[in-house]
Amino acid sequence: MKIPQYTVLLIVSIGLAILSCKPEPTKTNPEFTYPAEFGSIAYPNPSNKPAQAGIELGRHLFYDVNLSLNRTISCGSCHAQVHGFADHNLPVSFGIYNRKGIRNSPSIINMAWSPTFMWDGRIRHLDVMPIAPFTDTNEMGMTLPGVMERIKENSKYLNLYQKAFPNKEINEETTLLALSQFMLSLISNNSKYDQVKKGKTKFTNSESNGYELFKTHCNSCHSEPLFTNHQFEYNGIVAIESDPGRYRITQLPNDKYRFKVPTLRNTEITYPYMHNGSIRTLDEVLNKYVESSHIESNRNYSGKLIPITLSESERKDLIAFIKTLTDYDLISNPKFSEIH
Ligand code: HEC
Ligand code: HEC
């Protein structure tokens, strides 16, 4: 995805507009709360608190294929609820006219806590995030004014905007704020792991052993409770010239092949894996970690990899633990789905 020049201007103008926008909670807009166990949010716009009407408008926009050039692709096409809001098991995503991107579509859950966006972290504010897919020629292929025209074509939006942003216009600002509200509401915190943490159930022996292995070998990067440390790290698995990751943005030699650490919440259902979707199964992922962590130069460069060797039963245990991070509530909750 390329970011057009005018994005910078837009960030500034949205920033200014946002300062003057404070929706009051009412009966139809009850107060939204973030789960305390995840700590303070990173979303830098406190005046855009998710509320029922804003989330609902955001949901309609998120699933609207009319907001792409040939009316075939919505945000939900590449961020599918049944796959934990990652893609439909494709290595890289297809946009309009079956055009292919270069990266695997990440799960977009728990975005409220994410300080940066994209595998290389090139976007720093959730409110401007949708501009990239809307305008990318390989994704939705639109301009923002074009998106606004498509929205104004559909009379259902009059009522939805009115409820979400009373006395405000249907414009780029309110559109982006509503999409943020929907994304902020995509919280995944009801997996078996979460139930265990709340004392409501227990791990099996195998999951428990897996958890110990996880804490030793994986937690430094995929840190609890969000299962990411939100940093750009090197795991030595897919280091290819064509995509040097964070380096593309900073040009710092030490950022070569570093990528934003993906959350492992719901990772059971977000395959295939890594920024280019080149690894198909969790078993294969573990093989790659065993391989990579035994290469001394990888360990020196990463600073966080430690040599890992897994017996057959340890491998099963670690996978059993990772599967406790699947949140069946998230993937079946009608609040987040296309139709209800
Ligand atoms: C054609 C597929 C496609 C469509 C359509 C699409 N995305 Fe994405 N999305 C991706 C890919 C691929 C990435 C990662 C790109 C990268 O890192 O360079 C991504 C990244 C993101 C991220 C960053 C996640 C993170 O953890 O850093 C967010 C948020 C997001 N998309 C939201 C949206 C929204 C909102 C829409 C609709 C306006 C949308 N996407 C439409 C494929 C898509
Ligand atoms: C040095 C930091 C680091 C450590 C330690 C680490 N990872 Fe990762 N992990 C990453 C990064 C960075 C990525 C993304 C790399 C890429 O896309 O090329 C990743 C990707 C993954 C993915 C793919 C997720 C997705 O959505 O594509 C899985 C699964 C995974 N790691 C599991 C593990 C397990 C299990 C362990 C422990 C054995 C572990 N990781 C240890 C940094 C780390």
Image: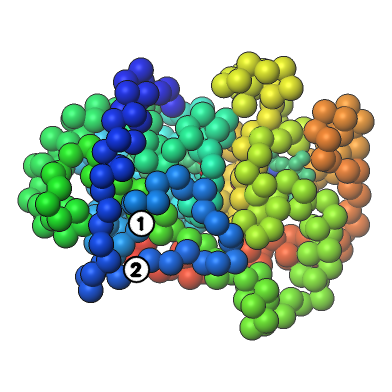
In the current view of this chain or complex, which residue is farthest to the bottom?
200
Q: Position of residue 138 (x, y in %)?
A: 38, 27
Query: Which residue is found at the position 59% from the left and 48% from the top?
Result: 271
Determine the residue positioned at 13% across, 44% down: 169
Q: Residues within 10 Å of mark 2 (few under 14, many from 20)?
A: few
Name which quarter of the figure residue 230 lies in: top right
Quadrant of the rendered image holding ligand 2: top right
Q: Quadrant of residue 162?
A: bottom left
The residue singled out by tag 2 in the image is 31
| Above/below status of 102 relative to 323 | above
From the viewer's perspective, is residue 324 above or below residue 244?
below
Q: Helix, strand, or loop for circle 1?
A: loop
Density class for disc 1 (Cα within 10 Å; few <14, some 14-19, many ≥20) is many
Image location of residue 48, percent across then percent down? 34, 51
- Amino acid bearing label 1: Lys
User: In the rendered image, which residue does mark 1 sit on?
Assistant: 49
Is residue 101 visible in this depiction of the protein?
Answer: yes
- What sort of colour scheme is used for the picture? rainbow
Estimate the spatial distance between the alpha carbons at disc 1 and disc 2, rounded to whole Å. Answer: 8 Å
The answer to whether residue 32 is left or right of residue 211 is: left
Q: Identify the amino acid type marked 2.
A: Glu
Q: Residue furthest front?
A: 20
Labelled pair 1, 2 in contact (Cβ < 8 Å): yes
Position of residue 93 measured from the top left corner of the image (x, y, whole percent): 45, 36
Label 2 sits on a secondary structure element that is: loop
Task: Give the mark count.
Answer: 2
